[in-house]
Structures are given as structure tokens and as C-alpha cells.
Image (cartoon, rainbow, N blue to C red):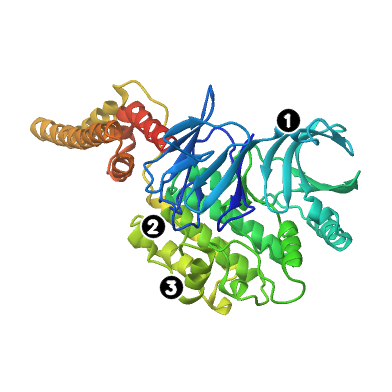
Amino acid sequence: MPELRVETGPQKNQTFFLRPPGPYQIGRDLLADYPLFDRRTSRTHFRIDFRDDGYCLTDLASKGGTYVNDELIECTVLKPGDRIVAGRTAFSFAVDHAEDQLIGRTLGGYEILERVGKGGMGTVYRARQQSLERIVALKVLSGEVASDPELCALFVREAKAAGELSHPNIVRVYDVNFIDGVLFYVMEFMAHGSVADLLRREGKLPVDRAIRIALQAAQGIEYAEHEKIVHRDIKPSNLMVHESGSIKIGDLGIALRLAERKAQPGPGAISGSPHYMAPEQALGRAVDSRADIYSLGATLFQLLSGVPPFRGQSPKEILFALVRSDPPDLRKLTPEVPEALSVLVRSMLAKDPLRRPSSIAVRQGLEAIRSAESRHAPPPMPDQDPRWKPYAALVVASFLALALGAGVGNFVQHLGAMINGRNVRLERVQAALEDGHRALKAGQIDTAQRKLEEISNLPGSLDDWQILQPQIDEFKAAVRRARSTR
């Protein structure tokens, strides 16, 4: 699996892991797959696609250009060891699975199959637990951590504490061990990636889906608080998607506490992710579960709007904004967000921890909002029935009206009005579908997305939706494909 290692620039020593299927867009835009904190790069600088002939890098008409091995390029197939320069940032391209000595080894009964992720504290592998014949995730801590006895002891202690937790919305830790100089822990394997992957593929999420994700995360935070554990790094990439569709909190304080200990022993250490970090955490103050509430609020803000609440050209700018500035009005970014949900998110993002709701209040608030929204939501779209069935309800209703005393003239007039009203609604849906398909052909994906939202907000009965169900499903799939290849 390929990766870009940052050799020089503001993000030196960071690794961008290029997990298939891609593509990956890289640039200064915070909505890029890998945003760069480099003012000399363009907002959309270059893209890497996975093709039959290899990994293809394409310059996206950047102002300063993209250089591969000191040559200005428009498009080229990358080779291991290639040096890529964009602005002041230089990357090395590597495909190093063949060099990974752990792949194929067995550690303590776990057969390591492949590498699936890499972070600052170590590497995550997909492995097979031989005794139970199940797939697990095995996280190996970096050599720097494994060589420090104090950090090793801290890691083992935290992993054991996490292993005692049992909740449907928290990733289970199964084992921790130190074998042949390798320090690792074993946890549930989450094959569907993270909520961050979901955001990268689909952009902002529908309100109901965002609420469901946040509600499950809130339930996990509430349980962790009861167990006196603070995560301190709640963010989309730490909310994992189980194959059942449920959301589970990963890395429950283990890697974060290690990072904090490495950065600066004692009070005052700062660790976490700038876009989601609570103000008191950014200031190096003591934190409790209310910091997790803030981070969940920032995550929910991004799920609903597509962007984090605070942005900047560098981590320092982001931290300054979250400490000093108020978050944007969520409903101005996403008007369909209910007022009650906007108020709840804003309270979760309060600067003063004392003004934030408790984890119980967040969970109860999300449950109440979801319940209220479900009562006002349009009925679900069932499998397609024969085209005559929706009109059967009209005829039956009209004959009932006739049986109750309506004259023949009134009956005909009533039936005509009902059918005319239905035809108007169906024409509006069909017009929106046609406009949406034209927008997709023109590459106007945002316009197509708005047309999809317009269709979902049109009034109509269950019978109305049945008629156009196949066309709507086809258009939804087309929009989804267009967003994923954007």
C-alpha cells in the first residue's frame, strides 16, 4: 500500500497513507483528502489515482506546479522512491509492504496479514487470531515508544484499562503484549473504516444520519465517563464504522496519553487534533469528559456542514480561532438543520466547560431531536409495486366518498382534482431529476446534490413516491458515484 512521507515543509515527518480505492486530492483546501499547511501550495494542488499501470499523479493546474524528481509534470506514473515537491513541501513516495518485516510473521498467536494504517504512534495491521480463527486489528507501537520502559509500562497499563471496557459503541481491546521487541495491542477489526472516510467519500451527511452517528458516539462517551475515562481525541477518524453499520469509538485514550507523555511530562502538555480540540485542552489545562463533549460537538458540526467549526492556514491559526472566536452559524451553512439541533451543537461548543451539557444531556437531546424529526420525516420508499397500485388507493378513496353520499358529479370532480394534484407533484419530481442529471453531465455535482435535497423535501404521499422510486434511486446512485470520484 503506497504512502507519501513528508520530508520537508510545515508537516515534516507526517505520513499520508494512500489506502485504495482513492483517489486522493492534496492541497491547501481543508476539504482536500490530505490538507497541507503550506501557503505556497494551491488549494487543489495534485491528485493521485489508482490505475492498472500504477499510481498516477496529476497536477491540478496548480500555480507553482508539481515537480517529480525535479521535473515539472502534468501527469506521471509514480515509482517507489520518487520525490514530489509542491510549494515548500517535499514528499517521498513509497510502496513498502514488501519491506515490512512484520507481514507474514506470527506474534503471540496472531498472524499478520497486511498493513491497513499508520499514525504517529505506530502501525495498524489486519491479523488473524489463530486460536479463534477471527480477524482482528493489531496495532504495533513505534520503536521509539517500545524502547522507552516508562512509556511501555504506561501503554500496557492503559491498554489493560481499555480492555476492561465493554460497550456496543466502543472498540473492544482484546490483548496487549510485548514479544521479540514488538509492543502491540489487539482490538476489533473495523473493516468499513472511519467516519472520516465516510466524509471524504460523501461530504456532509443528511441530518438523520449525522444524528445517528453522534448519538452512538455520545452513548460511548457517557459510558466512558461513568468508567472515569476521558478520550481527549474524539474526531471523525476515531469514530469507526462496524460492518453492522454501528459506530464505535476507537483509540480510547491509549495512544493519546502516550503522545501526551512523550510531548511533555506533567501538567501543561497539549495533545489532540486542532480542529476538534476543546479550548481548555488547547491551553494546556486539565480536562475532563466535557472536553469530549466539545470534540463531539465539533465532529457533529462537520457531519452536518461538511467543514469543521474552525479553520485556518496552520494549526496555530486554528487553535487561536477555537480559543477566541465563536463558531459559525450552523443553520446558515446547512439550512435544513433543525433549530433544536443547532442550539445543542452550539452549547456543546461553548468555550467555558461549565456551560456545556453533560454526556447524559447530549444523549437525551439527540434522542429527542431524532424522535421529533422522525415524526415529521416523509414516509420511507418501499420496494417498487406495479404501477397501477398507487392509483388504486385514489379510486378506493373516491368510491368511499361516493358511498357516503357524494353525487356522481362531485365524485368525478373530486377524482380529477386528486389526479391533477398528483400529476403536478410527479412532474415537479421528474423536472428536478432531469435538471439533476444535466448538472451531473456538466460536472456540477453540488447543483445535483441540491436537486436531490429538493426532491427529498417535496410533499407527497407514500403512493406518490412509489411511482418514481427507481428513477430516484438511480439518481441517488449517480450523485454518490460523482462525489466519490470528485
Q: Which mark is residue 127?
A: none
Q: Amino acid at mark 1?
A: Ala
Q: Quadrant of the C terminus?
A: top left
CB within 8 Å, label 2 to label 3: no
How far apart marks 1 and 3 lie (CA) works out to 48 Å
Q: From the image, tell me which residue sits under label 1.
A: 98
How far apart marks 1 and 2 lie (CA) works out to 48 Å
Q: Earlier in the sequence, mark 1 or mark 2?
A: 1
Taking the view exactly as shown, the residue that stands out farthest to the left is 409
Q: Secondary structure at mark 3?
A: loop
How far apart marks 2 and 3 lie (CA) works out to 18 Å
Give the label, 2 or 3, closer to the camera: 3
Front-most of 279 and 403?
Answer: 279
Q: Which mark is residue 337?
A: 2
Task: State the image coordinates of residue 101 (x, y, percent, origin top left).
Answer: 80, 35
Q: Amino acid at mark 2?
A: Val
Q: Quadrant of the N terminus?
A: top right
Q: Amino acid at mark 3?
A: Asp
Residue drawn 37% across the image and 48% down it: 63
Q: Is residue 92 visible?
A: yes
CB within 8 Å, label 1 to label 3: no
Front-most of 390 and 30?
Answer: 30
Q: Earlier in the sequence, mark 2 or mark 3?
A: 3
Residue drawn 33% across the image and 39% down it: 445
Q: Is residue 304 above or below residue 118?
A: below
Task: State the image coordinates of residue 401 (x, y, percent, origin top left).
Answer: 21, 36
Mark 3 is surrounded, within 10 Å at the Cα level, by few (under 14), some (14 to 19) or many (20 or more) other residues, namely some
Q: From the image, tell me which residue sits under label 3.
A: 326
Q: Is residue 477 above or below residue 340?
A: above
Give the label, 1 or 3, closer to the camera: 1
Q: Is residue 374 visible?
A: no
